Amino acid sequence: MLSALRSRLYRIGFNLFPAYRRTGGRVTYVAPDWQEVRIKLPLNWRTRNYVGTTFGGSLYGAVDPFYMMMLMKSLGDGYVVWDKEAEIRFKKPGRETLYAKFSLSDEEIAAIRAELEADGTESIDRHYTVDLVDAEGTVHATVRKTVYVTTDRSKAA
């Protein structure tokens, strides 16, 4: 119950946080275990570009922080997580509300931990892809994120 309330508060906090709010995106769901996040990006006067479609900066900004945050929350203390690289592919102009769903599996979290515990492995890069889709599921943009993960030796005691 407490984790459900906490995830609801994170959702509200994201939507009120000025840097995220200005992207035009809205977080609609955060799983209590942080292994799923959903957002929507409406087309409105704040997200519309000169030609009437969703501004590319809004498309990227709305999806930017989530894989890093999800890994930070899922891995817990003892790990350092940073966004390292991003790429966006525009596939179709956004003329309506777009949606994105981010997910991590238990297997992915376990694989990261196991790889970092292996002898000689200081850090790893993980690659994640998320699509911005309309209500019918048509892909309008694909974002590929590279996330850097390492152990924080100062916290792992």
Image (tube, helix red, strand yellow):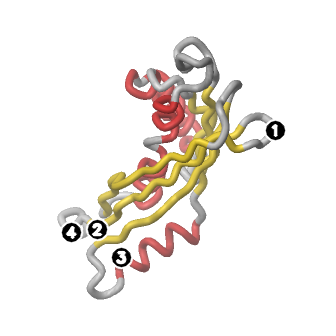
Picture residue at 48% right of the left edge, 62% below the top? 127
The residue that disc 4 covers is 153
Residue 36, given in percent of the width and then of the height, sits at 60, 49
Residue 93, given in percent of the width and then of the height, sits at 65, 32
Picture residue at 29% right of the left edge, 68% below the top? 151
Q: Which mark is residue 116?
A: 3
Q: CA distance from mark 4 to mark 3?
A: 12 Å
Identify which amino acid the numbered label 3 is placed on: Leu
Q: Are marks 2 and 4 in contact (CB under 8 Å)?
A: yes
Please tell me whether mark 3 sits on a helix, a strand or a loop. helix
138 versus 105 height, above or below = above
Label located before the other in sequence (3 or 1): 3
Q: CA distance from mark 1 to mark 4?
A: 46 Å
Please tell me whether mark 1 sits on a helix, a strand or a loop. loop
Q: How many marks?
A: 4
In depth, the one of 47 and 148 nearer the eye is: 47
Identify which amino acid the numbered label 1 is placed on: Glu
Q: As drawn, is 76 to the left or to the right of 49?
A: left
Picture residue at 50% right of the left edge, 73% below the top? 110
Label located before the other in sequence (4 or 3): 3
Instruction: Please tell me whether mark 1 or mark 4 is closer to you in this view.
Output: 1
Instruction: Please tell me whether mark 1 or mark 2 is closer to you in this view.
Output: 1
The residue that disc 2 covers is 151
Which quadrant would residue 117 be assigned to in this image? bottom left
In depth, the one of 32 and 86 nearer the eye is: 86
For the view shown, which residue lies furthest in the bottom direction? 119
Instruction: Please tell me whether mark 3 or mark 1 is closer to you in this view.
Output: 1
Residue 98, given in percent of the width and then of the height, sits at 67, 32
